[in-house]
Amino acid sequence: MQCYYLTIKSLTELDITLHRKISKNLRIQRSEVSLCVAIVNVEERTHGNYRIYSIPILSQRGQHKFVSTDGFLQPGTYLILPFLFNPINKQMDNTEFNIAVHSSCSIDLERIRISLRIQREFLIKLCIFYGEEVQTRNSMDDGVKIYELKKFWDGLILLVENRNLNKNVHFHFRCTLSQNAFISRKDSNHQLFDVIPSMHRQIIVTIARKNASHSFTIGHDFQYILSSQDFIKNSHINKQKHWPNIDESILSEDIHLPQSISNTKHQ
């Protein structure tokens, strides 16, 4: 995806706007495209991967022709991430857009292209930094953390984190009610099954408003167990780790692929 390196040499106030260019073909489906722009601190890793360790400036996710936000940044190097999401919350990399940046001091901008895998890292850190931790009966001592994100997101993101050293989390999600909402993955019964390995975290599902001019309703429940088995315990699913299936290849850009974590806070 296309993004920008931002270098700042002194404390700077920024105003940033993401404009989406609407073509004749896109105009018909413009209500199905959502925008979000963020400025993040990152650490570049191997194989084109990045670790986001803070999100100092962030816009709301919205179904508009443009979104904007502002804030103050300390001296340093940042990454500007312009996101254009389709109905199942995956980045649209073929839609034209403009970025407008106004600053109180001089800045340096460099346009670059990076892997779409940054979106998975962004959504995970968005949940950890701004989501609410769901308290379950065993959440204090079983090494499992569940985050629900509603702030900055017109819908819901569910993240599960497994910090057990030798147990997998078998997670079952069920969408009980959905009106005017897109679900990023589901089967015919609106159910999801996942096996989250030890010391991994996973975006289970993202749900977004379908039509911005109408209200939406999301009802859901979930349950999980710890197990040493690494495949789903379900007679209708034949020894799979995820249902519906997700792309588990090394270079997968699927936002639902489990991501390894370390013992470092917010790693």
Image: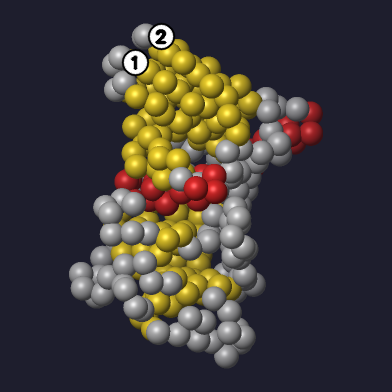
Q: Residue at x 61, y 22 (%)?
A: 98
Image position of 106 with respect to 5: above or below: above
Q: Mark 2 packing: few (<14 Cα in 10 Å), some, or many (20+)?
A: few
Say the numbered circle drawn on residue 122: none
For label 1, the SS is loop
For the rendered model, the colour scheme is secondary structure
Image position of 199 with respect to 167: above or below: above
Q: Quadrant of residue 64?
A: top right
Asked if residue 197 can be seen in this view, the reply is yes
Where does the image place residue 113, in percent across and percent down from the top left? 60, 34
Q: Amino acid at mark 1?
A: Lys
Q: Residue furthest left?
A: 140
Q: Residue at x 45, y 54 (%)?
A: 157
Where does the image place residue 205, in percent across and percent down from the top left? 50, 60
Q: Nearer the viewer, residue 89 or 163?
A: 163
Marks 2 & 1, CB-CB < 8 Å contact: yes
Pointer 2 or 1: first along the chain: 1
Asked if residue 211 can be seen in this view, the reply is no
Q: Is residue 164 left or right of residue 110?
A: left
Where does the image place residue 76, in percent across and percent down from the top left? 34, 24
Q: Is residue 106 left or right of residue 214?
A: left
Closer to the observer: label 2 or label 1?
1
Residue indicated by mark 1: 9
Image position of 13 with respect to 224: above or below: above
Badge count: 2
Distance between mark 2 and mark 1 Cα atoms:
8 Å
Q: Residue at x 71, y 36 (%)?
A: 94
Where does the image place residue 255, in percent across and percent down from the top left? 54, 55
Residue indicated by mark 2: 106
